[in-house]
Amino acid sequence: MVSLSLTDEQGPGSVRVVPTTARSALRKIPDTFPHDGNVNPFIGCAHGCHYCFAQYTETYQNKKDFHFFSEIKVKTNIAAVLDKELSRPYWQGKLINLGGVTDAYQPAEKDHQLMPEIWKTLIRHRSPVVISSKSSLILRDMELIDRLSRLTFVNVASTIITDNESLARRIEPGASTPVERFSFLKNIKENTRASTGVHIMPVIPLITDSAESFHQLFARSVESKADYTVEYPLHLSGRTRTHFLSFFKKEFPEKYNVFIPLFQAKHVDQSYFTKLRSVINSIKSSYPLGDGYMELFNQRLVTPQLSIDFD
């Protein structure tokens, strides 16, 4: 294996990028999820979001010092493997999620350019797709996104938990700014047939859970022409719990003793969750936003498809 050095485009420090090969590209997802399969072009993610649930993938690497945020494995053959797997009858028409446990447009994508070939593969197979990214690099491939969106369902989302730029930088040090994320969603909405959404999750108790914050995010979502938003509170388990509690204690020490009782288990306290849901529902009712992409997906299934020429 050859190691490459890569400086994070926005976050501090650097990450180690290691090319590798994939034996498979598609991973089946349980029926509890709205999509049918995940495609992860990378292992690890340099965006360094302190709440990232996918830190558990560290335990699956045969290397004790592998770190999810600082060593990124690049699956250089992912498009070719995906092409073979999508040729199987099972995957025809199945809804694919790009980047279930990584961001497909993290900094390593700028150099390795895996996604253009993945989009072309999806176009060949007319595979419906959902993707969530925190990087404006996705606009590089907007023409390919447009081509696929004219053939089948495509949904592009971005996680945006706050529109406070300095707070976002502390919590998500390597991601594009909230302004950039809202901007690329609007750009995609205006220039493709893809639907778009904003993932306001995780909602972090005492930090991003104010009524003012939700009003701002819903208003910005409408301005960016998003079709829907999804909201869900922070979930802490395994490595994510250890990492996030350490981060929270360091960054928000004055709130730590109030925060801890809310997470006696991996799920947030039920009374807090019930109150949070009530507040969100009350505020969101004033905005023309849906609650997810499945209704849009089902609508697209009965919409006549357009045809295009593609080399």
Image: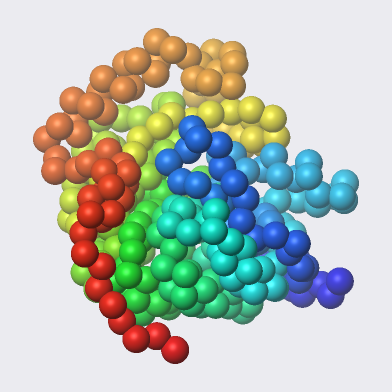
Q: Which residue is at 64% across, 60% downward?
A: 25
Viewer-proximal residue, 208 or 275?
275
Question: In x, y percent, where is residue 148?
Answer: 37, 71
Please say if 207 is above or below 106.
above
Q: Which residue is at 54% across, 50% downward?
A: 37
Left or right side of 292 for 176: right
Viewer-proximal residue, 159 or 20?
20
Can you tell which quarter of the image residue 103 is in?
bottom right
Q: Which residue is at 58% across, 61% downward?
A: 88
Q: Which residue is at 43% across, 57% downward?
A: 93
Quadrant including the C terminus: bottom left
The number of numbered badges drawn on the structure is 0
Quadrant including the N terminus: bottom right
Left or right side of 265 for 297: left
Please name the colour scheme applied to the rendered image.
rainbow
Residue extending furthest top? 271
Residue extending furthest bottom? 311
Question: In x, y percent, where is residue 297?
Answer: 30, 50
Please say if 69 is above or below 105.
above
Question: In x, y percent, where is residue 158?
Answer: 39, 54
Left or right side of 15 for 261: left
Please say if 288 is above or below 242.
below
Tell me if I can see residue 258 in this picture.
Answer: no
Question: In x, y percent, where is residue 282?
Answer: 18, 25
Left or right side of 55 for 147: left
Viewer-proximal residue, 301 or 16?
301
Tell me if I can see residue 127 in this picture.
Answer: yes
